[in-house]
Image (cartoon, rainbow, N blue to C red):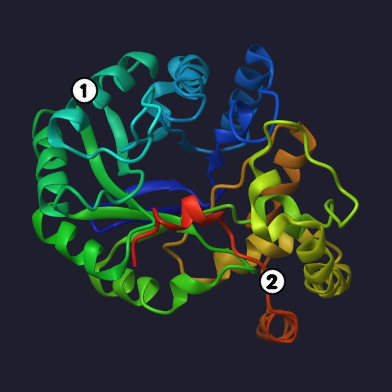
């Protein structure tokens, strides 16, 4: 597995990481625990070194699974987790008060079976807490040796700049894929200027870009895609043209749609590290195979033409989720 560097402080990780959320959260019934542990360990064996989790996934269970799986190889891997949501509060919402950050980190360390977190993200920007206070709290945790790198998730350019001025930001994690390119407007130029890495989540469009989902697909109870506008039957039908166009590019290369989608992200910048998730060993192999695919200028032009001809339809979050995105 090739490696890439996130941030100017030199956090080296595999070119593709593993998003662990779906093992226990968000996509219906959770994976059986030992099977999830086995899949994570298989990823390690195949060269993956970046593993992404969060306290809210489950909640809590995902960190426990990741901690169990990676304990035997802790020194060889990079664990990223997140703080920032109210858990157990019926009203929900975000909470990035410094005292809350400190409490979350202590609990996460126990669940992850480690004495340090490699990369700690603010999961969503909290409009009630100045980002300078958030960055300052993480800076103190770094000084204490409990955290090594600071990250943000779904933060806008100005928030990134303000946080970075207090504590250097190593990576931003936000959605970025063939059907969500908004980061290209202002976020990616900001990251390039400041020397911050980018970790795209949902790089396969929550499964849609693989071609395995169409207008007739039904999602399990508890699968969050049931409430996502982009996954309404009408929008899935409208978005099918993009997947078909992607399929033609993939066929010409002798690879899969998923591999094209991941290879396209890898081709955008050398400091981009996608974190596709999966619960299947064969899909893990397929995803990791994208790291060895070199897209030519002609390939990239064909993909861009397909994107222009078939823009994605539908919002990527329901209204409640849209409110949590920093602009």
Q: Residue at x 56, y 55 (%)?
A: 317
In the structure shown, which secondary structural element does the residue marked by tag 1 occupy? helix
Residue mark closest to the camera, 2 vs 1: 2
Camera-side residue: 64 or 144?
64
In primary-sequence order, the first of circles 2 and 1 is 1
x and y percentages locating residue 61 in the rendered image: 50, 19
Above or below 21: residue 200: below
Camera-side residue: 278 or 2?
278
In the image, taking residue 150 as reference, residue 74 lies left or right, namely right
x and y percentages locating residue 295 in the rendered image: 68, 73
- Residue that mark 1 sits on: 103
Q: Is residue 204 visible?
A: no
Q: Residue at x 65, y 47 (%)?
A: 227
Locate residue 148: give its quadrant.
top left
- Residue that mark 2 sits on: 313
Q: Residues within 10 Å of mark 2 (few under 14, many from 20)?
A: some
In the structure shown, which secondary structural element does the residue marked by tag 2 occupy? loop
Q: Residue at x 30, y 62 (%)?
A: 196
CB contact under 8 Å: marks 2 and 1: no
């Amino acid at each position: 597995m090739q490696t890439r560097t996130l941030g100017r402080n030199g956090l080296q990780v595999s070119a593709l990481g593993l998003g662990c959320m779906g093992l226990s959260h968000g996509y219906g019934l959770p994976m059986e625990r030992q099977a999830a542990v086995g899949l994570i360990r298989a990823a390690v064996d195949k060269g993956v070194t970046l593993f992404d989790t969060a306290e809210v996934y489950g909640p809590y269970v995902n960190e426990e699974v990741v901690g169990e799986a990676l304990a035997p190889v802790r020194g060889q891997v990079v664990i990223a987790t997140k703080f920032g949501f109210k858990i157990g509060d019926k009203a929900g919402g975000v909470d990035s008060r410094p005292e809350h950050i400190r409490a979350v980190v202590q609990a996460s360390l126990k669940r992850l079976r480690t004495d340090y977190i490699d990369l700690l993200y603010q999961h969503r920007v909290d409009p009630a807490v100045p980002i300078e206070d958030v960055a300052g709290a993480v800076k103190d945790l770094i000084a204490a040796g409990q955290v090594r790198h600071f990250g943000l998730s779904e933060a806008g350019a100005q928030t990134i700049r303000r946080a970075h001025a207090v504590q250097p930001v190593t990576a931003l994690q936000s959605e970025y894929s063939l059907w969500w390119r908004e980061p290209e407007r202002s976020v990616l130029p900001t990251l390039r200027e400041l020397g911050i890495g980018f970790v795209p989540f949902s790089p396969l469009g929550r499964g849609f870009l693989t071609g395995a989902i169409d207008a007739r697909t039904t999602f399990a109870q508890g699968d969050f895609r049931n409430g996502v506008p982009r996954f309404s039957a009408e929008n899935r039908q409208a978005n099918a043209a993009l997947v078909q166009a992607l399929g033609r590019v993939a066929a010409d290369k002798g690879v899969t749609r998923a591999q094209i989608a991941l290879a396209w992200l890898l081709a955008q910048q050398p400091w981009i590290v996608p974190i596709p998730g999966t619960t299947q060993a064969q899909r893990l192999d397929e995803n990791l195979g994208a790291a060895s695919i070199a897209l030519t200028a002609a390939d990239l032009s064909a993909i861009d033409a397909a994107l222009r001809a078939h823009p994605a339809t539908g919002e990527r979050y329901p209204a409640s989720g849209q409110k949590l995105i920093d602009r």
